[in-house]
Amino acid sequence: MDTQLFIPCFVDQLFPETAFNMVRVLQKAGCKVHYNKNQTCCGQPAFNAGFWEDSKEVCSKFIKDFSGTEYIIAPSASCVGFVRNYYNKLFENSSMHNEMKDLQKRLFEFSEFLVKVLQVEDLGATLNGIATYHDSCAGLRECRIKEEPRRLLKNVRGLELREMNESETCCGFGGTFAVKFDGISAAMAEQKVDNATATGAQYIISTDLSCLMHIDGYIRHKGLPLKALHLADVLAG
């Protein structure tokens, strides 16, 4: 199956290994992965900051960059959720309306693509230890992803998955929220990490590196024996 790869800005700049791991997993699952080097941002940062016209320019480029018929896969529910739920506000009844609708149908978050489209749940991965899963706001509420990553993790050899309290509660990142309300953001990260460590987990896993970056910052600051991992990094192991 031919697929196109969408790598969000912060993944490209800060976590490129996760992108490479996603490619490895997709290839292992039988996909031929294509990468358009001209791709840039999905437009979410400008949109969320209120600069809708600037965002629309970036979003228009995104639609053109991912034209075609292939499925588009991304390691970020945040970006996928933005395209699915907010492009309508920019392109409804515009000349790009039909292209936008087609793009939305072909765009998938990594775990939902594996489970719902490829119907693959066992990638032959191994990770010895105990893990807990964090439901990102975008994954849970914008992409409706809940069971898909858990099904994949339950098939990882050597891994015991334990549910933490309030797994669906926000970690406190929220993009510019973490900058504007740093005290509240840090307290939310503390609550999330406390709930994770209470399970005895060695790993906290999610589908969104934005959440994991925020959580990992708190873990490192406190010197805690907990490691934040993206699902793709686990499945490539």
Image: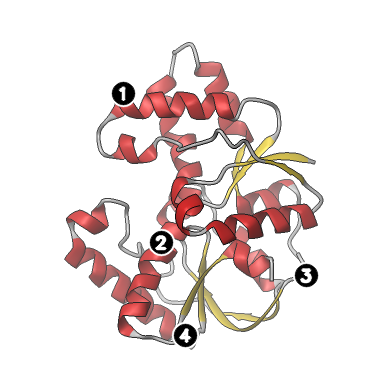
Query: In the figure, residue 34 lies in which quadrant?
Result: top right
Q: Nearer the viewer, residue 1 or 65?
A: 65
Q: Which mark is residue 199?
A: 4
Q: Residue at x 54, y 53 (%)?
A: 145
Helix, strand or loop at mark 4: loop
Tag 4: amino acid: Thr
> From the viewer's perspective, is 163 left or right of 110?
left
What residue appears at the point 73 percent right and 61 percent down from the top-left corner?
121
Q: Are marks 1 and 3 in contact (CB under 8 Å)?
A: no
Q: Sequence-wise, which precedes: disc 4 or disc 3?
A: 3
Q: Is residue 126 left or right of residue 14?
A: right
| 141 left or right of 74 in image | left
Mark 4 or 1, nearer chain start: 1
* Residue at mark 1: 53
Mark closer to the chain start, 2 or 3: 3
Residue 77, percent from left and from top: 50, 50
- In the image, taking residue 183 as reference, residue 117 lies left or right, namely right
Instruction: Give the residue at mark 3.
Output: 124
